[in-house]
Image (cartoon, grey):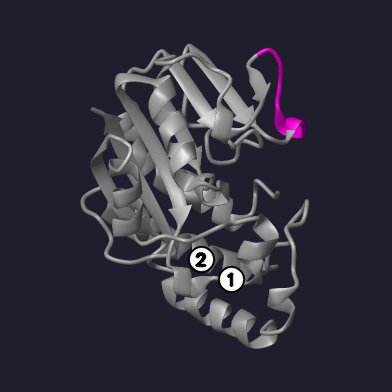
Amino acid sequence: MQPDYWWYRARSEMLQTVLGPHVGDAQRLLDVGSADGPSVGWVTAPHKVSLDLDPRGLRPPDGVCGSLLALPFADASFEAITAFDVIEHCEPEADALRELHRVLEPGGRLLVSVPAYQWAWSDHDVANGHHRRYTRRRAETAVEAVGFEVRRATYGFAGVFPMFVAERLVRAARHKVARRTHRPVDVVDVPEVGDGLEKVLLGLCRWDERVLARRDLPFGSSVFLAAVKS
């Protein structure tokens, strides 16, 4: 992962804009799957635990190597949980969401991001070990099915969406055959962008941030969601 890559930097700012207000004053927080940290630096709590399958990004004493499908924590252990671009890696999805629900205390907050639109599936998803992509409604339905109440759900990365669509169409054209044989890889390459294009992309994402501070976006390449354990 490249934490200074434009996409991670922009995602961090959007996540803070959309989901930051829902963290509240949580004292006990679990961060799932973001041990490398580029999107969760803004999330703070007196007792913050990071959990990841990959131990390389974990730091003692609050780094725990484990699976979202079998969280090594007691019921109602946390007041808030972040899971940014994690749930799409989990199968069965419902088992992962039930585990998140189990370790949250009543009234606890779940903050999630997932990739958007199954039609955008590509070799990039395969390499990342994804099982699915989401619409906003699909994400809402999944968390509601295990007992969460959605407080906010919106798309993100609308400003760069035309370029995202074009990039996925190019990938689909180039990898029609290879896509069927690819497997998840340890380190996934990201498209290189020059300094000029990076400035354009970040500028478009700042437009997203300004809009998201006031209202939801109707489309985009990611879904951001905040929910509460009823």
Q: Name the residue: 43% across, 43% down.
A: 94
Q: Name the residue: 61% across, 63% down.
A: 125
Task: Count up the numbered dots.
Answer: 2
Looking at the rendered structure, the kind of residue marked 1 is Leu
Among the 4 quarters of the image, the one containing residue 226: top left
Give the vertical position of 59 relative to 100 (above or below): above
Give the vertical position of 24 relative to 61 (above or below): below
Q: Residues within 10 Å of mark 2 (few under 14, many from 20)?
A: some
**Residue 119 percent location from the top left of the image:** 46, 75
Q: Nearer the viewer, residue 226 or 15?
A: 226
**Residue 228 percent location from the top left of the image:** 28, 31
Among the 4 quarters of the image, the one containing residue 196: bottom right
Among the 4 quarters of the image, the one containing residue 135: bottom left
Q: Which mark is residue 122?
A: none
Q: Secondary structure at mark 2?
A: helix
State the residue position of label 1.
197
The Cα atoms of the two marked residues, 2 and 1, are separated by 6 Å
User: Quick check: is 189 in the magenta stretch?
Assistant: no
Q: In screen coordinates, is 36 left or right of 106?
A: right
Q: In screen coordinates, is 83 left or right of 196?
A: left
Q: Secondary structure at mark 1?
A: helix
Q: Are marks 2 and 1 in contact (CB under 8 Å)?
A: yes
Q: Residues within 10 Å of mark 1 (few under 14, many from 20)?
A: few
Q: Nearer the viewer, residue 146 or 44?
A: 146
Q: What segment is highlighted magenta in the picture?
A: 55-61
**Residue 157 percent location from the top left of the image:** 42, 61
State the residue position of label 2.
201
Where's the C terminus, which quadrant? top left
Q: Nearer the viewer, residue 67 or 173?
A: 67
**Residue 5 percent location from the top left of the image:** 64, 54
Looking at the rendered structure, the kind of residue marked 2 is Leu
Give the vertical position of 196 relative to 82 (above or below): below
